[in-house]
Image (cartoon, helix red, strand yellow):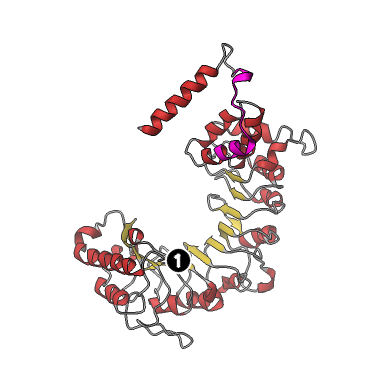
Amino acid sequence: MEQETQRQEVDAKIGAMVGSNGSIEGDQVPRLPIEILCQIVNHVQLSSSAQRDLWVMTLVSRAWYAAAIAPLYMKPGISGKNFALFVRTLCPSINAHIRRTSFSSMVKELNMSKLVHDSSKSLTSRILGRLKDGLETFVAPQASFAINCLAALSKCQHLRVLDLSYVPENLGLLQLLRSISKLSRLELLSIRCKIDFTSDHQPLNVFWPPKLKALQLSAPINDNDLVIFETMPKSLISLTLHHCLKLNSGSIKRILVDFGHSLESLRFEPRTSSLAFPELAHWLGYAPRLRRLVIPASSESVRTNYDFPKEVRFSAENPHPLEHLEFDCTYLDRYGSELDYEEIWLAIAEGCLGRVRRLGFRHQTNVQPWRTNRRELQELHDLLRALAREDGENARVKEEDAGVYICT
């Protein structure tokens, strides 16, 4: 209520300064130092209505325009309603050498995921060509990104985040990597692709961006395609594998042996019942730095009598650093099975999972675990909260964030 009252007072003061022609009188515009204006702009950027508020600021005066114009174009909110005007502003001409605009270098983050049929593949390529000097984050549109956009994408040398997960047209992985392998600043890559090479390809022909830290991959890879991981950069700390239906437990072990020692986050969602899921020791033993793990649940997933690899041993005295563990129980739901919650409790309270503070269970929408296993889940929740409380104020996971959660 107080914030709403203050906003109304500000609107009233601005209304008092507006002249009969609808503009603010020059002698009534507040003259503030540019440093103060920048602080105001930085505060406005955090609000949900930042796009509209920043646009209004550019209309006040030249000083306000200078302070607000770059933040306005830094992260433009694009939808079907304003896309045409956005394109006319950044790309006033098809010819890249005519009528260049300074606004293009201001765009740092471009999210086109809300566009469906509003753009075209050639237009997307032209936009990338105009924004290549400053673009750091790009989320591709659903229907207007294809192979002809890769040439323009390869010239965006400042890219740090690239999300192609919305693109329904599966791009060839080898062809994609050839286009983005020289993006030296790229840290996060999310792609949905197809395998466009055979197993006789040499691993050296597949290159990844040299500073890649996080990879989200959705592709029908099998044992013969694991050569793509052999040239993965050592900087990778987060790996997510979606819909990899043809992988088995041996494939998972091979991936973890190659670069699991550097992983801090691992998410594996095969979404299939044909996979022989390995026990938790395979995931933890080959990834000694792992802090977040999302894996399919099975009857063997939560055994407390773990057979760890010879290179590493975890116990109650030397617990694994894992803090966030989530089980995908959709496979168990399909066959009416359940996890052994007592084994999970023992692994956390008396076993090698003593540092886990967040525990999640992913179920089908028609499953209500809080009704069928309410007592077991509440005991786990209380245990995690108590352990987080004992960790103190400097804990990585606060007490209010610890506990059990259910998701679908």
| Image side of residue 366 versus residue 25, left or right | left
> Farthest bottom residue?
310
Q: How many marks?
A: 1
| Image side of residue 289 versus residue 337, left or right | right
Is residue 307 within the magenta segment? no
Residue 239 vs residue 288, the one in the foreground? 288
Q: Which residues are magenta?
A: 25-40
> Residue at position x 39%, y 85% from top?
307
The picture quadrant where one finds residue 328 is bottom left
Q: Is residue 80 visible?
A: no
Query: Of helix, strand and loop, which mostly describes the magenta segment?
Result: helix
Q: Position of residue 233 (x, y in %)?
A: 62, 70
Give above or below for 336 relative to 253: above
| Image side of residue 213 versus residue 332, left or right | right
Helix, strand or loop for disc 1? strand
Residue 63 vs residue 223, the one in the foreground? 63
Badge 1 amino acid: Phe
Q: Position of residue 95 (x, y in %)?
A: 77, 36
The picture quadrant where one finds residue 41 is top right
Q: Which residue is mark 1?
A: 268
| Image side of residue 388 versus residue 82, left or right | left
Q: Position of residue 264 (x, y in %)?
A: 49, 69
Q: Position of residue 48 (x, y in %)?
A: 47, 38
> Residue at position x 61%, y 42% from top?
74
Residue 48 vs residue 328, the one in the foreground? 48
Q: Is residue 368 visible?
A: yes
